[in-house]
Image (cartoon, helix red, strand yellow):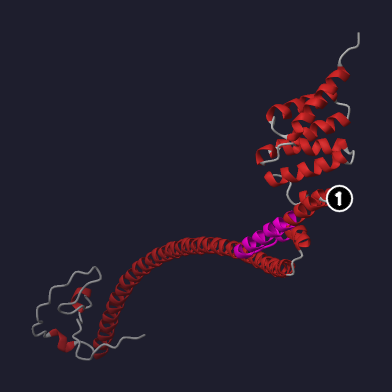
Amino acid sequence: MSAQVPANDPVDRGGDPGARRGPGAADPGGVTAAPAAPAGPDLAAEHVEPHLLDAEAVYGELDLLRRKLDDQGALLRRNQLALTELAESVGKLVAQQRRRERSFTLSSFVAYLLFTVLLGGGFFMLYRSRAGDLVAARDRAVIDRDASAARVRELADQLDARAQAAAAAHDYWTLLRDGKRSEAIAQYPDVQGAELTPTERELFAEGEKKARAEMVDAGFLAGLDAFRAGKLPDAVTELRRALAYEEEGTRAAQMRYYLGVALVKQDQADDGTHQLELALAGRVDKAGVVDARYWLGVGLEKLGRVDEARAEYDRFATAQPQNPLSVTARRKSAALARMGAPKN
């Protein structure tokens, strides 16, 4: 790039560099030269050659141009140095920014990682808790379902049992209504084990008790009539049938008395004495039957149990001295005593 020197720029024609810089110009060292004193009228200049004046002007312009170039070079060097320093500062800032970005990126990554871990852990704990609740709810639902199914089966079984019990109750009531006492008594244990209502249970118990009492009464009366009529086999049959429905109590003791006497009279002394012993154990003598011991003695005598027979005869005669059979009892006791006495 070429610099143009203005035409009105004063030029020192003496060739002195200091004089050629002109007033107020700076030297290459950076020191401003003092302005030259205005030149006075130079009488010798009028005699200078014109071509010499042109060369000096060119040299002056070149020198001025050189000085400007030097100034521009110094300025460029200063600018380059400033740019270098600026570039270094920018580089340092960029490096710091990059380090900051890396640190920020790493911190962001760590924060993201921690956030992800915490969030994942939270979701996992929530899942575990929710899964545990769901499993517990499922287990409770399964238990409730099984309990409900068991309850349904239980209710179904109860309904079936109740239906069967209702049918059995109707059949049993039919037996009681029709007066089939023996069948009603025989089927009562089966009906008693059915699923009856309290009313049905009490009603059937009363019906069975009544049927049993009627059967005992009928058998006892029939046996007593046969005994008094001398129909001892019939009496034994009826009395045994009555005893099948009532084996204990005062009336049972009375039936055993008549049964024992009938058996003894039919020479079935073994069974007869057993029935008489049961009758006495049932305190039949306290119920108005006073000759039970007499007939027990007769049965024992038939069995050959002489000593026991004598004892029963004596006890009867002692307890019932006014009874017509007491005389016979004493006589039999004496006869048995003579039979058992040793001979000289």
| Image coordinates for residue 130, horizontal then vertical, percent | 53, 64
- Dominant SS of magenta comes to helix
SS of the residue at dot 1?
loop
Disc 1 designates what residue?
Answer: 231
11 or 92: nearer the viewer: 92
178 or 129: nearer the viewer: 178
Residue occupying image coordinates x 81% and y 48%: 227
Residue at far top of view: 344
**Quadrant including the N terminus:** bottom left
Residue occupying image coordinates x 67% and y 69%: 159
Q: Which contiguous range is marked in magenta? A: 189-216
81 or 17: nearer the viewer: 81
Amino acid type assigned to the residue bearing label 1 in the image: Lys
| Image coordinates for residue 324, horizontal then vertical, percent | 74, 35
On whether residue 47 falls in the magenta region, the answer is no
Residue 32 figure quarter: bottom left
237 or 32: nearer the viewer: 237
Residue occupying image coordinates x 68% and y 67%: 162
Residue occupying image coordinates x 15% and y 79%: 23
| Image coordinates for residue 275, horizontal then vertical, percent | 79, 39
Vertical comparison of 238 with 15: above or below: above
Residue 177 figure quarter: bottom right
Vertical comparison of 170 with 48: above or below: above
- On the rendered structure, is 102 left or right of 21? right
- On the rendered structure, is 293 left or right of 5? right
On whether residue 191 falls in the magenta region, the answer is yes
| Image coordinates for residue 79, horizontal then vertical, percent | 32, 73
**Quadrant including the C terminus:** top right
Crowd class of label 1 (few under 14; some 14 to 19; many from 20; radius 10 Å): some
